[in-house]
Amino acid sequence: MTTAPPTSTDAPPQPAAPPPRPSPWAPLRPLVLRLHFYAGLLVAPFLLVAATTGFLYAGSFQAEKIVYADEMTVPEAGGSELPVSAQVAAAREAHPEGTVSAVRPAPGDDATTRVMLSGVPGVDEDHTLAVFVDPYTGKVRGALEQYGSTGALPLRTWIDEFHRDLHLGDGGRLYSELAASWLWVIAGGGLVLWFSRRRARRKVRGTTGRRRTLGLHGTIGVWAGIGFFFLSATGLTWSTYAGANIDELRTSLGHSTPSVSASAGGDHGGHGAAAGSGGSGEHGVGLDKVLATARAQGLGDPVEIVPPANAGSAYVVKQVERGWPGKQDSVAVDPATGEVTDVLRFADYPLLAKLTRWGIDLHTGVLFGVVNQLALMLLALSLVVLIVLGYRMWWQRGRGSAFGRPIPRGAWAQVPPQILVPLLAVVAVVGYFVPLLGIPLAAFLLVDVILGEIAHRRGRRTYGTGGGAAEEAAAG
């Protein structure tokens, strides 16, 4: 009996799969890591102050309503309101100092009218004294110093100035601009580092020590990252240096914020501001007629009436509602005839002007009211927690490697030119337009190059005296 030879079922050996090709962006990771580390370490104190004061500012809108309830509201709402001119006269009787610079009629049934006085002794030049008048009785319910287009009263003004310049004036504004310039860079670098890590290394559960801190830090940063980008971009729009560059760019593109023409034109027959009104704000046809004309043009509450600045100027009535949808229309009214001389609708604003307006209002917490303010408080709290966790990671790293390894020598040479050249061009342009980003960035890179050279020479000396290659590798 013959037996067939056994047949093998084993498949021929397959060649090993080639290793995955490294991403051309991989050589940039050491740079991003060092930049995130340096910026987080050195800029974090400024961000901590900005986040803390921003948290307080977001809450100050509601606090203001409680602290100044007597001035801002009337004890009994209802009935017929007195003419605006009569309310202004009551305010001037109680406070004859200064001149009327603007009037905000009561925007609601339970709200008071604000009569703003400029040139009042003891009041800052860029502030006004707001006199609060009961629109039903004409009784003056108080007077408080006021600042800005949102009508910030002393509590909110103090917090606002602390957030903006630490009460140090124009020089102090550099702190907030530095924080806004770097927030998006730190957030962006953190996102790149987080998503470039392997999924298994992003887990927080079951980890301990520095790895757990890193996981919490990254998770919070991912969820809050978009908000940080927004806060940074909108914060820069009214900063000292970057803000001026942004304004110049918008102007060159024809997207600057327009304003209604306050020129009345024609001969006013002595009814202009130059004719004198005792600082009451009453010129020509008067406040009541001007307000009625503005109402006929569709300007609903809340509005602000600005008296003519001189004999050739008109009244300007503008809506001051910053909530969504914004009411930002304005009209100019001739004080001699009561006729509308110019109309500006918010719908006709250039796109960048609209985006700037909405961005600032969202940043300051007025665009969506309480919801907006709560979201800002949550973002500020997230930033504070991230900074605390970041410093904790630094502490957990230990003294021996507290400042980590410098960027490896030759790292730039590993970056493909088609990525490196455009990247350097973008960095140069951004650094020019945002100088408080560009100057510190150049300093960070210079310091790291120096540290890398020192570490390299120290390792080379150690290697030359028999210390071995391990020390040279540890030096980076």
Image (spheres, grey):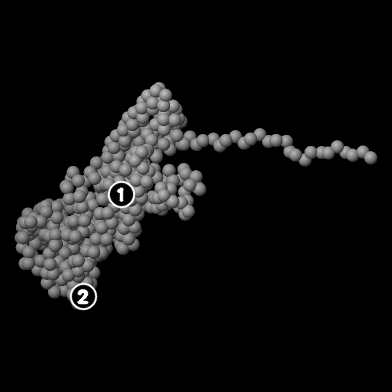
Q: From where the camera sits, is residue 155 visible? A: yes
- For this rendering, which residue is in front, 201 or 460? 460
Q: How many marks?
A: 2
Q: Secondary structure at mark 1?
A: helix
Callout 2, which amino acid?
Ala
Q: Which mark is residue 77?
A: 2
- The residue beneath circle 1 is 234
Disc 1: CA contacts within 10 A as few (<14), some (14-19) or many (>=20): many
Would you place residue 91 above or below residue 378 in this image? below
Q: Is residue 404 above or below residue 472?
A: below
Q: Position of residue 47 (x, y in %)?
A: 29, 48
Tell me the kind of residue under disc 1: Thr
Q: The N terminus appears in which quarter of the rendering? A: top right
* Tags 1 and 2 touching, CB below 8 Å: no
The part of the image, by quadrant, that contains residue 470 is top left
- x%, y% of residue 181? 30, 43
Circle 2: element type: loop
Residue 216: image x %, image y %? Answer: 41, 52
Q: Position of residue 382 (x, y in %)?
A: 35, 54
Of residues 426 and 320, the one nearer the viewer is: 426
- Label 2 crowd (10 A; few <14 / some 14-19 / many >=20): some
Nearer the observer, 244 or 274: 244
Q: Residue at x 10, y 66 (%)?
A: 91
Tag shown at residue 116: none
Alpha carbon distance from label 1 to label 2: 39 Å
Closest to the camera, between mark 1 and mark 2, is: 1
Q: Can you name the residue that lies furthest to the top here?
A: 464
Q: Residue furthest front?
A: 466
Residue at (42% x, 24% y) in the render: 466
Q: Residue at x 39, y 39 (%)?
A: 32
Mark 1 or mark 2, which has the lower sequence index? 2
Quadrant showing the C terminus? top left
